[in-house]
Amino acid sequence: MTRFVHLNGPSAVGKSTLARRYAEAHPGVLNLDIDQVVSLIGGWRDDFYGTLGPARELAISMAETHLRSGHDVVMPQLVTNVEQAGRFEAAAARAGAEYREVVLTVGKAEMATRFDGRVASGHHRDIDDLVVRQGGRVVLARIHDHLTAYLAERPEALLVPTDDLDADGTYEAFVAALA
């Protein structure tokens, strides 16, 4: 059975890097990074949240199409809304696939440290600039709190604590969670 793997977690926890590595190690897996889909929609820098909804709908269609072709999808995407996660689950069901949500967790202080390092690297420059413009560490703390509250409603989510893990350890823990 094909799988729709939703890789959830706060900013700078490594979702995109992990999804890319997983897809590279598993031929045929679609790395469906919604932040990349957002960037394909004109005006997204001026209205990120206005383009996020349509980008998620596009991603759902892409995921269903890929799953129906008999291949897995890994989607790195922060979600703190149970209804939105339900849309991803429903897409997997419509395609006859299994939905697995893996949440990379990290403490607030470590998340802020990782975010600062990511900003310095320029790896996700546009998204990071958006977070900084909206309040930086205050926004990160709010994201962390929303994700924590969301997880209380998602007992089926597989949690992977990452505070004490390097990139390789996080990848290994993610793959083990999927087994």
Image (cartoon, rainbow, N blue to C red):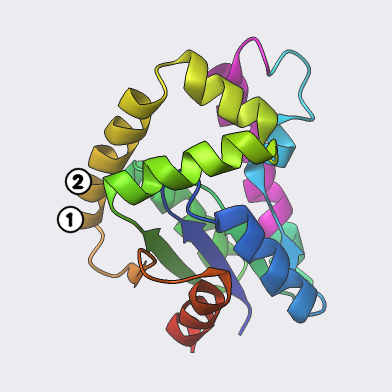
Q: Position of residue 152 (x, y in %)?
A: 17, 55
Identify the residue at image location x=68%, y=16%. 45
- Secondary element type, mark 1: helix
Q: Residues within 10 Å of mark 1 (few under 14, many from 20)?
A: few
The answer to whether mark 2 and mark 1 are in CB contact below 8 A is yes
- Secondary element type, mark 2: helix
Would you place residue 109 above or below residue 133 in this image?
Answer: below
Location of residue 51 by image quarter:
top right
Identify the residue at image location x=67%, y=40%. 121
Q: Position of residue 47 (x, y in %)?
A: 60, 13
Residue denoted by label 1: 152
Amino acid beneath label 2: Ala
Q: Position of residue 110 (x, y in %)?
A: 35, 50
Amino acid beneath label 1: Ala
- Does the magenta run of residues contain 55? yes
* 97 sits to left or right of 132: right
- Does the magenta run of residues contain 71? no
Q: Which residues are magenta?
A: 45-63
Q: Residues within 10 Å of mark 2 (few under 14, many from 20)?
A: few
Camera sees residue 70? no
Checking the image for residue 47, the label placed there is none
Residue denoted by label 2: 149
